[in-house]
Each structure stands twice: as C-alpha cells, then as structure tokens.
C-alpha cells in the first residue's frame, strides 16, 4: 500500500502586495442587527450519542457490498450484514452461534493468530479461500481482513464471492491453453497489422526461433503476395468484414509455402475494433497431394489414349504386313530387284511399327523425353513418349 504522504500535495496561493495593503486600510463593518443567532439544539446524553453512533454503524454495515462478518479476538462472530446472510444462507442470529473458522473452509485457530499479528503493521490482510455455506456447498472467495478498534478489538472479514471471476479466469486459461496447443497458427495483430501475439504453431510453421521474433512484425511481411495481403488487411480493419483465402507465405529463410488464412476483426468490450485475429493452416501437403492426384489422372488419361491408339493402329498394321507378303508371293522378285528391295523395306517398316505398337500397349507410366537436341528443346512440341 502506498504511504499517506504519496497522496499529499501543497497548494500555493500568492497575494499581491498592493491587494494586501488595500485590505489593511479597510475595516470590515458588521451589521449586528442582521445577524440571527440560533439557540443551541438539545444536547444528546452519552447513551443517546452511543445509540446514534450505533445506528450509523448499523447503516454502514448493512450498506456494504461485500459480505461483512465481525468477530472478536477469538474468532467468534458477533455481527454480520444482510449480504453475509445471502452468501452463507445463515440468519444473523445463527451467525452469532458460529466462529469465522466455520465459514472459511479448512481454516484453523492459527489463522486468527497469523492475521492478528500481521494486522499490527498492515492496514489489511487479503485471503484467497473457499467458504462454506449452511447447506455444505462451497464458493471461492476473496476475503479482506482488518482490525476495528472499538471498546473491544474486533476483526472485520469482508467476503467477496468470486465464482464468476474464477469461472472467467478458468475459461480464459482453457482458451489460452487451446490456442497454445492448436495445430493451426493463431496470430493477434493490432490496428496497424503488427503482430502482438503468435502461438507456437506460427513460430514452427514460419521457422522462427521463438515468438518474440514475430512481435511487432507487419503481418503482410509474412506473405508473398503484397496486393492480396493488403486487400486482406483492408477488408478486416477498414471494412470490418471477415476474410478467408489461400495465399503464398514466406518463411524466415525466404522459402515459400501455401497457407489457408481466415481473418476477422478483434473487438473490445465496447465493440470497437482494436485489431485482427488470423488463423493459418499450412496446406503445402494438401497442395502436393492435389498435384499428385492431377498427375495420376493425367497419366491415366494419356495411357488410355495410347492404348486406344494402339488398338486402332494394330489392325491396319497387320493388314499392311499381310498384303506385303501377298505381293511378294504374286510377283517374281528376281525379275525386278528394285521392287524386291521396296517390298523388303516396307515389310521391315511394318514390323517396326508392329513392335512399337506392342511397346506402347505395354506402357504403364506416361513419361516423355526430348525429341531433338535443339535450342528450344524444352518446348512442348519437342517431347515424345518414352517407351
């Protein structure tokens, strides 16, 4: 607690000398005829004064927001307020049959001695404990204790039910643990799109050493597409709309990867936008799987096309080879050496085509190779099926 002198201050008033001299020259005149002196009111007796003080004390006690329990030095409850009756479900008469140790779960007589000793030098003591109701149920409480110095020393216990606050704290703790252990990256940024919080998944995904390296970074610097990232920030912070999409992200080492982003405005208790919350999912594996599926489908289609081509070309090739053989038998090759050579070459070409068709029909993987060793050898027109 701060000392009293920390709250003290000195106010200085300057009076001009001429004003002071002028005031000395003037003599105040009092018109006694206009002054009415009221007769003194009736004086209270000592017992009446005590009764009035007790009445004010009772009004103060009952108006306190917290449950108030007043005990003697030994912890016996001597007074309570309505709020205490609501919290503990006891009547004021029932309270006077109890000790404060009955109200604070798990407490012992040594607690009173410790409190009393500490309060000799401190204004109050603060306890975090569970309190016990009349029906045996419990509630978490924050208890402030101080000494009330009357004719007899009294201990004042001001009990505040913190069930709602404890539930909120537990919920926040649960949500924090969920965010910290989430597989997706979670980032909280301010109204300037600067990172204020990043969970471990973001640190791991972007390849940073710790979350502190991310603090203060502009969220747009973590993405490669400047135009798309700017549109995302503008949609969330300026238009106050949610945004989702797929972008290319940029790791600490400069390497790129695909990421799915969902972003929304972050608002305070008054509904004012104070920043943005972003969720990131690394979809690089999914992209690779999609590419593999597309490649497999392409392979299937191409192999099916090759198989169909082999089927349609096989029959004409067989007819050509058969006809060549018939021509050889019907002609006298010895009479025309040129014709014989032509027939031989044609037959070899037909056999080669049949062999190629057989190989094509047996292909299980669509793989291409370069056809010509030329300058534009990388062009699609310069690749053929590898058989």
Image: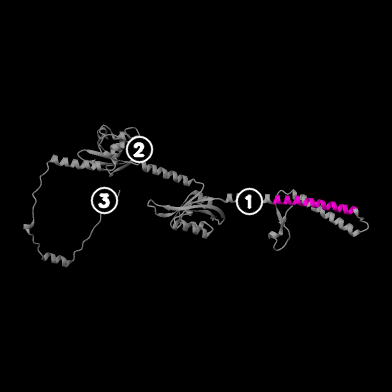
Task: Give the CA distance from mark 1 to mark 2.
Answer: 61 Å
Task: Give the CA distance from mark 1 to mark 3.
Answer: 77 Å
Graded by Cα atoms within 10 Å as few (under 14), some (14 to 19) or many (20 or more), the crowding at tag 1 reads: few
The dot on residue 139 is: 2
The dot on residue 294 is: 1
For the stretch drawn in magenta, the main secondary structure is helix
The dot on residue 4 is: 3
Graded by Cα atoms within 10 Å as few (under 14), some (14 to 19) or many (20 or more), the crowding at tag 2 reads: some
| Display colour scheme | one colour
Question: Which residue is at the far left?
Answer: 33
User: Viewer-nearest of labels 2 and 3?
Assistant: 2
Q: Is 138 rendered above or below residue 335? A: above
Q: Earlier in the sequence, mark 1 or mark 2?
A: 2
- Answer yes or no: is residue 342 visible: yes
Nearer to us in this view, 120 or 28: 28
Question: Which residue is at the far right?
Answer: 335
Q: Earlier in the sequence, mark 2 or mark 3?
A: 3
Q: Earlier in the sequence, mark 1 or mark 3?
A: 3
Question: What range of the chain is rendered magenta?
Answer: 302-329
- Could you tell me residue 194's position as x and y percent? 46, 56
User: Viewer-nearest of labels 1 and 2?
Assistant: 1
| Magenta-colored stretch includes residue 188 | no
Left or right of residue 245: residue 114: left
Left or right of residue 303: residue 24: left
Q: Is 189 rendered above or below residue 54? A: below
């Amino acid at each position: 607690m701060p000392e009293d002198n920390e709250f003290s201050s000195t106010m200085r008033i300057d009076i001009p000398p001429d004003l002071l001299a002028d005031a000395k020259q003037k003599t105040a005149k009092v018109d006694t005829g206009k002054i009415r002196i009221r007769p003194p009111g009736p004086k209270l007796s000592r017992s009446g004064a005590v009764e009035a003080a007790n009445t004010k004390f009772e009004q103060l006690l009952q108006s306190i927001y917290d449950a108030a329990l007043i005990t003697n030095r030994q912890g016996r409850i001597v007074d309570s307020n309505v709020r205490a009756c609501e919290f503990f479900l006891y009547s004021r008469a029932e309270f006077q049959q109890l000790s404060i140790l009955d109200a604070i779960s798990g407490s012992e007589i040594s607690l009173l001695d410790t409190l009393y000793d500490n309060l000799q030098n401190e204004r109050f003591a603060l306890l975090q404990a569970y309190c016990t109701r009349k029906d045996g149920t419990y509630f978490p409480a924050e208890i402030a204790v101080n000494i009330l110095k009357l004719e007899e020393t009294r201990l004042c216990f001001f009990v505040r039910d913190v069930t709602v606050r404890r539930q909120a704290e537990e919920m926040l703790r649960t949500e924090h643990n969920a965010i910290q252990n989430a597989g997706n990256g979670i980032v909280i940024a301010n109204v300037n799109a600067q990172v204020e919080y990043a969970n471990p998944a973001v640190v791991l995904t972007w390849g940073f050493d710790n979350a502190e390296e991310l603090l203060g970074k502009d969220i747009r610097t973590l993405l490669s597409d400047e135009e798309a990232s700017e549109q995302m920030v503008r949609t969330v912070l300026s238009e106050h709309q949610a945004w989702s999409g797929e972008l290319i992200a940029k790791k600490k080492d400069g390497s790129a990867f695909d990421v799915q982003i969902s972003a929304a405005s972050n608002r305070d208790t008054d509904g004012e936008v104070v920043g943005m919350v972003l969720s990131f999912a690394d979809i690089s594996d999914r992209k690779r799987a999609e590419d593999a599926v597309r490649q497999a489908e392409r392979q299937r289609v191409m192999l099916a096309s090759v198989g169909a081509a082999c089927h349609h070309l096989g029959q004409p090739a067989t007819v050509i080879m058969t006809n060549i053989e018939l021509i050889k038998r019907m002609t006298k090759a010895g009479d025309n050496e040129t014709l014989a050579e032509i027939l031989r070459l044609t037959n070899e070409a037909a056999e080669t085509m049949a062999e190629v068709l057989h190989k094509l029909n047996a292909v299980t993987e669509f793989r291409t190779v370069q056809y010509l060793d030329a300058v534009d050898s990388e062009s699609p027109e310069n690749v053929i099926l590898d058989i």
